[in-house]
C-alpha cells in the first residue's frame, strides 16, 4: 500500500519498547487503509511459494510425518495467513491470527475499507501469542510446545500461565542481535531447524530368537532412506554376554552380524550393534524395546532404575507376567513402575523363525500413548509384517501371556497322537478361558481384542508351531514311552538355550487361580498345570473339566488362600 517505510518505523518502535504492539498495529492499520480488492490483488500477485522462506515446507512436512502438530500463530492477518497455512498443509483450526474489521458500504452492505481489528481476537493483545498457546494447550494436552518466533515480544509466548515450553529465536527474515543474545537457540533459517531435529536412538534389550528377528526388521527400517531423518541408523542390542566357542557372544554378533548361539541363520544387518553392558545399551535411548524371557525382566528393570532417558518410550515384546503376593503385574506395568516411562506392547502370531524368513505376519501394538504407538509402528512395520494399533494394551498383553499355557495343552494333544478335532477343542476352550481370566483381573479389557492377531491369531499359530507346543509334545511322548524327562531337560535339549515361557506362566497363573479358588472356573488352565506338575497324567487334557474339578492336596485352594 506504499507505506512500507512508515510501517517499518512502527515495528521498530515496538522492538525498542517505545510503543505497545496494540498501538503500533492500530497506527499501521490507519496507514494501510486497504480495501478487500487490495487484499485479493495481494493474494493473487503474492502466491504462497513466493512468500515462504526456503526449508519451511520440508520442515513442516517432516514434523507432521513424525506426528508433531504444527500451528501457525501470527501477529499478521488471518486473511493473508490462511493461504500460507493451506499451502503448508496446516488446517484452518490450527491458525491463530488477527482478523480484519471492514467498513460496510451504506447502500450494498459490502466491505469497502479496513477500519481496524476484531478486538475479540487474542492476537491483537501484547500477550496474544501466549494466550493463543494457552488456548491450544487447554484443548490438547501436548507434552511439549516449542515456539519459533523472531522478536523480543514473541519471547513472551513462553511466559506462564499456559505459554510454550521452549522458545527458538528465528533470524531468517531479519537478524536481530537482541533476540540472538536473549535466546538459547537461535537459527538463521528453517534448514538448521530441520537438521536439528533429534533422531531417535533405538535400543533392543534382549538378543534371543524373537529379539533377533525383531531387530532384523527394525534395522531394515532404520537403514531405509525415507526414515533416515527420524531414527538413527544403528540399533543397539543388549546381549547377556557369555562365551561362545572361545569368543564373547557380543564380539561374535558384531563380527558375524548374526547371533550364532541363540538364533543362527537370521542376518541382523551391519547396523545392529551388540553391547554387553545393559546400562550402556539403554543410556540415551529414546526408544527402548524389551524382548527377553520374562523371568529375567525384574532384574533388568531393577538394574535400569533411574538410568533411562526421561521421556523415553518403551515397548514390550515379552509374553509373560509376574505374580507377587499382592497380585499380578504385567511386564508393561513393571516397566512403567520401575523406569517411570510409557510402555506399549507388541503382540501377535509372531513365531520368530518364520519372521526371520520374512513370511507374512501380523501384530498389534497395544498403547496408552498414541504418539508412541505410531512411532513404534513406523519402526517395526515391514511389507511382510503388518501392524494394527489397539487401544487395549492390557488385553493384548494378557493374550500374549496366556496363550503360552494353552499351547502346552495343544502339545499334549499332539504328543498323545490325537487329531485336529481335539486340538480345536483345546484351542476354543483356551481362548474362552483367556478372555474370562483377563476380564476377571482387568474388567476394562475389550472383547474384540481376543479376535485380533494378538488373540485368536497368536493362539492358533502357537498351538500349531510354537516352542511351547513342541516341548510339551516331546514331554508327553517321553512320558508315554516310559522315558519321562523334565521340562527343563527337554527345554535345554530341544531349544538349545532358547527359553520356554509356558510352564513358568502356568505356575504363575495357577497361583492366582488357587488364591481365588477359581479352579472350576478355569478347568483347562488348572488341568494343564496339574499335568505339567505331575499331579495328573497327560491324558487328562481331553478331560479337563474333571481335571479342574478334582480335589488334589497341595494344588487346590486352601482356607488360608481364601
Ligand atoms: P529366547 O527364548 O531365545 O531366550 C534366549 C535369550 O535369553 C538369549 O538372548 C539369552 O541371552 C537370554 N538369557 C539367558 N539368560 C539370561 C539372563 N540371566 N538374563 C537375561 N537374559 C538371559 O528369547 P526370545 O525368543 O527373544 O523371547 C523373548 C520373549 O519374546 C519371550 O517372552 C517370548 O515369549 C516372546 N516371544 C517369542 C517369540 C519366538 O518365536 N521366539 C515370538 C513372540 C514372542
Ligand atoms: P513359543 O514361545 O511357544 O514359540 O511362541 C512364540 C510366540 O509367542 C509366537 O507368537
Image (cartoon, grey):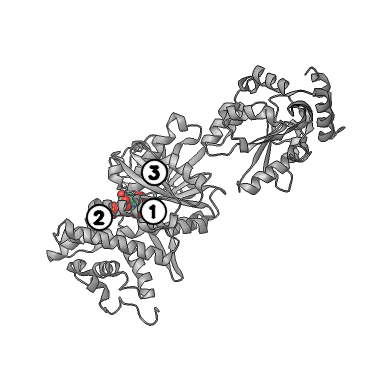
Q: Which mark is residue 387?
A: 3
SS for callout 1: loop
Q: Locate residue 167: give its quadrant.
A: top right
Check the image and name the residue furthest to the right: 18
Q: Position of residue 470 (x, y in %)?
A: 22, 55
Is residue 100 positioned above or below 373 on the image?
Answer: above
| Cα gap from disc 3 to disc 2, whole angstroms | 22 Å
Q: Position of residue 552 (x, y in %)?
A: 26, 78
Mark closest to the chain's N terminus, 3 or 2: 3
Q: Position of residue 495 (x, y in %)?
A: 26, 52
Mark closest to the chain's N terminus, 1 or 3: 1
Q: Which mark is residue 318?
A: 1
Q: Locate residue 270: give its quadrant.
A: top left
**Front residue of this view, candidates 132 and 473:** 132
Crowding near the residue tagged with mark 2, few <14, some 14–19, many ≥20 C-alpha atoms within 10 Å: many
Q: Which residue is mark 2?
A: 463
Residue at 86% x, 33% y: name it.
Answer: 19
Q: Nearer the viewer, mark 3 or mark 2?
A: 3
The answer to whether mark 1 is within 8 Å of ligand 1 is yes
> In this rendering, does residue 15 appear at all?
no
Q: Nearer the viewer, mark 2 or mark 1?
A: 2
| Cα gap from disc 2 to disc 1, whole angstroms | 18 Å
Q: Left or right of 229: which side holds 84?
A: right
Amino acid at each position: 500500500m506504499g507505506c512500507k517505510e512508515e510501517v517499518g518505523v512502527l515495528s521498530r518502535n515496538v522492538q525498542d519498547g517505545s510503543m505497545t504492539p496494540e498501538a503500533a498495529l492500530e497506527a499501521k492499520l490507519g496507514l494501510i487503509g486497504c480495501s478487500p480488492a487490495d487484499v485479493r490483488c495481494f493474494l493473487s500477485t503474492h502466491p504462497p511459494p513466493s512468500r515462504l522462506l526456503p526449508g519451511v515446507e520440508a520442515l513442516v512436512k517432516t514434523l507432521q510425518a513424525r506426528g508433531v502438530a504444527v500451528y501457525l500463530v501470527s501477529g499478521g492477518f488471518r486473511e493473508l495467513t490462511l493461504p500460507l497455512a493451506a499451502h503448508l498443509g496446516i488446517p484452518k483450526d490450527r491458525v491463530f491470527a488477527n482478523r480484519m474489521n471492514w467498513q460496510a458500504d451504506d447502500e450494498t452492505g459490502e466491505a469497502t475499507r479496513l477500519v481496524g481489528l476484531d478486538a475479540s481476537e487474542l492476537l491483537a493483545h501484547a500477550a496474544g501469542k501466549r494466550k493463543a498457546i494457552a488456548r491450544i494447550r487447554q484443548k490438547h494436552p501436548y507434552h511439549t510446545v516449542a515456539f519459533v518466533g523472531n522478536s523480543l515480544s514473541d519471547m513472551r509466548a513462553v511466559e506462564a500461565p499456559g505459554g510454550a515450553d521452549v522458545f527458538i529465536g528465528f533470524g531468517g527474515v531479519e537478524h536481530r542481535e537482541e533476540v540472538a543474545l536473549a535466546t538459547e537457540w537461535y537459527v538463521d533459517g528453517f534448514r538448521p531447524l530441520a537438521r536439528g531435529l533429534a533422531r531417535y536412538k533405538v535400543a533392543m534389550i534382549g538378543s534371543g530368537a524373537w529379539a533377533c528377528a525383531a531387530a532384523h526388521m527394525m534395522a531394515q527400517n532404520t537403514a531405509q532412506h525415507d526414515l533416515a531423518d527420524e531414527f538413527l541408523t544403528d540399533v543397539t542390542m543388549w546381549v547377556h554376554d557369555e562365551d561362545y566357542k572361545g569368543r564373547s557372544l557380543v564380539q561374535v554378533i558384531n563380527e558375524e552380524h548374526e547371533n550364532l548361539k541363540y538364533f543362527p541363520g537370521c542376518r541382523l544387518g551391519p547396523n545392529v550393534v551388540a553391547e554387553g553392558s545393559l546400562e550402556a545399551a539403554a543410556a540415551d535411548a529414546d526408544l527402548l524395546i524389551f524382548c527377553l524371557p520374562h523371568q529375567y525382566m525384574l532384574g533388568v528393570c531393577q538394574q535400569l532404575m533411574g538410568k533411562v532417558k526421561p521421556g523415553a518410550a518403551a515397548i514390550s515384546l515379552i509374553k509373560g507376567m509376574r505374580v507377587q503376593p499382592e497380585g499380578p503385574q504385567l511386564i508393561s506395568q513393571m516397566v512403567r513402575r520401575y523406569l517411570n516411562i510409557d510402555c506399549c506392547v507388541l503382540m501377535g502370531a509372531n513365531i520368530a523363525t518364520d519372521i526371520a524368513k520374512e513370511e507374512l505376519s501380523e501384530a498389534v501394538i497395544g498403547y496408552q500413548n498414541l504418539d508412541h504407538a505410531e512411532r513404534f509402528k513406523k519402526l517395526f512395520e515391514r511389507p511382510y509384517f503388518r501392524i494394527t494399533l489397539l487401544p487395549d494394551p492390557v488385553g493384548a498383553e494378557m493374550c500374549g501371556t496366556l496363550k503360552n499355557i494353552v499351547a502346552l495343552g495343544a502339545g499334549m494333544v499332539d504328543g498323545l497322537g490325537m487329531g485336529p478335532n481335539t486340538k480345536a477343542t483345546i484351542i476354543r476352550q483356551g481362548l474362552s478361558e483367556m478372555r474370562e481370566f483377563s476380564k476377571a483381573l482387568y474388567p476394562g479389557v475389550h472383547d474384540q481384542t481376543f479376535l485380533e492377531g494378538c488373540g485368536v491369531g497368536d493362539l492358533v499359530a502357537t498351538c500349531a508351531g510354537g516352542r511351547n507346543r513342541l516341548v510339551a509334545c516331546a514331554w508327553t511322548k517321553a512320558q508315554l514311552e516310559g522315558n519321562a524327562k523334565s521340562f527343563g531337560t527337554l527345554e535345554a535339549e530341544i531349544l538349545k538355550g532358547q527359553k520356554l515361557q509356558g510352564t513358568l506362566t502356568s505356575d504363575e497363573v495357577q497361583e492366582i487361580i488357587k488364591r481365588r479358588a477359581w479352579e472350576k472356573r478355569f478347568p483347562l488352565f488348572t488341568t494343564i498345570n496339574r499335568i505339567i506338575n505331575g499331579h495328573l497324567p497327560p491324558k487328562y487334557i481331553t478331560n479337563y473339566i474333571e481335571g479342574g474339578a478334582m480335589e488334589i492336596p497341595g494344588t487346590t485352594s486352601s482356607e488360608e488362600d481364601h
